[in-house]
Image (spheres, rainbow, N blue to C red):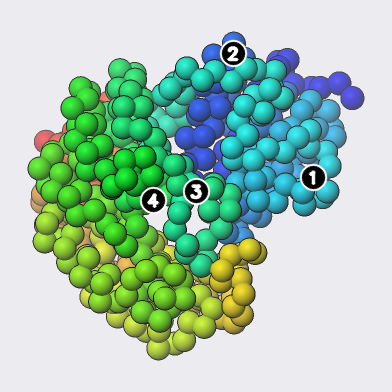
Amino acid sequence: MRTKSAKKNKINVVTLGCSKNIYDSEVLMGQLKANNKEVVHEDENDEGNIVVINTCGFIGDAKEESINTILHYAHKKELGEVDKVFVTGCLSERYKPDLEKEITNVDQYFGTHDLPNLLKALEADYKHELIGERVTTTPKHYAYLKIAEGCDRPCSFCAIPLMRGKHISTPIEEVVEEATKLAKKGVKELIMIAQDLTYYGLDIYKKRELARLLKALVKIDGVEWIRLHYAFPTGFPLDVLEVMNAEPKICNYLDIPLQHINTELLKSMRRGTTHEKTTTLISQFREAVPNMAIRTTLIVGYPGETEAQFQELKDWVIDMRFERLGCFAYSHEEDTHAYKLEDNVPEEIKQQRVSEIMDIQSEISFELNQLKVGQVFKCLFDRKDGNQFVGRTEFDSPDVDNEVLVDATKHYIQMGQFINIKITEAGDFDLYGEPV
């Protein structure tokens, strides 16, 4: 059947999953552009007659979304609306043989380290010299900056090492070169990402060098905010806190998934820490950087989690008063260490526990937000949504955290600009304010 697409050989890249996947799609698009290929990202009109789906394979819901997306484009291929469908990313890395057997209308499947082969299938050459060259898909004033690939942590519930491999740090000079290029394009906020930021440097420098990397990045002209995502609690390099406190460009913000607080469950999760050590670490953070916003993520419904252990987690969340918190139901993943355990917490109990944690966090967030009313915050504005301009403080990351809303019928704000906003009202998660 002939394709119905408006353009020939236009490649539509569809990205699912986390910020690391967004980064990988941007690198792929940069390579394609350098090969003079016409490429779009998640084209609303589905104009691309060649589709590349960058999948997520992290937990059940993400896998389901990836499979549904593959099926959607495989069906479009059957109808003649697209010519070719290629699948890459984590799901493809993890389940390639199964996918090839079950969804046969895909032209080819590629893993997470198959970029040169994927490019070859797209009739493009892999250009080694393109350090830091990519097509950013985020608003032009912020960008993700991946400083390492893979993970060496042995967490029992996590399949990421199966999909991403061992931890490989990107050398400091390459990260700085990429960040400098981004700054020249107008990027003002760098969101540093890796599976584990705190392991950075151990493989290539034989010691943790996140602090040294941060000291190099703050020297880049044009960059005003540097944000840290995905730290690991065990072996956290405390010199990072000194740099955060000393350097205004580094946001007083840390995303550190802690997963649970019960010592017995932490041991089963292979997290290398205890209730006491985790609580002490959070105290160290707040003592070193009193104005820090800590974002964490928790897992409930892990195999064997008792009511008493869940109550311990709830009590701890109330005591810690995290500025930002997300919660997930445990997903029983094949080939992980925890897969040997019985997944014995019923799904409805898991979901009930997620709701209970998020209800507690909603109250905490509301109370912390009330303290911001009357204060002035430097905010970066990302977009206009209906009659509101939507921005963020340094304590908020895009898409996952609180937002600052300004009435667009009364004020004008240019996107990508830093504006001082006085907070006039606050809800559970959003702040409302006006320029000063």
Q: Circle 3 is placed at which residue position?
A: 166
Q: CA distance from mark 2 to mark 3?
A: 30 Å
Mark 1 vs mark 4: which is more N-terminal? 1
Q: Looking at the figure, which quarter contains the N terminus?
A: top right
Image position, residue 269 (x, y; %): 46, 71
Viewer-nearest residue: 380 or 152: 152
Q: Is residue 90 left or right of residue 232?
A: right
- Front disc: 1 or 4: 4
| Amino acid marked by disc 4 | Asp
Is the residue under label 1 in contact with that under label 3 (CB below 8 Å)?
Answer: no
Q: CA distance from mark 1 to mark 4?
A: 31 Å
- Front disc: 3 or 1: 3
Q: Circle 4 is placed at which residue position?
A: 196
- Front disc: 3 or 4: 3
Residue 305 in view, yes or no:
yes
Image position, residue 149 (x, y; %): 46, 42
Q: Circle 1 is placed at which residue position?
A: 100
In percent of the image, x 53 and y 53: which residue is there?
Answer: 161
| Amino acid marked by disc 2 | Asn
| Amino acid marked by disc 1 | Glu
Dot 4: element = loop
Image position, residue 188 (x, y; %): 27, 28
Viewer-nearest residue: 189 or 433: 189
Residue 428 in view, yes or no:
no
Residue 420's disc number: none
Mark 2 vs mark 4: which is more N-terminal? 2
Mark 1 vs mark 2: which is more N-terminal? 2
Q: CA distance from mark 2 to mark 4?
A: 32 Å
Q: Circle 2 is placed at which residue position?
A: 35
Q: CA distance from mark 1 to mark 2?
A: 28 Å
Mark 3 vs mark 4: which is more N-terminal? 3
| Amino acid marked by disc 3 | Lys
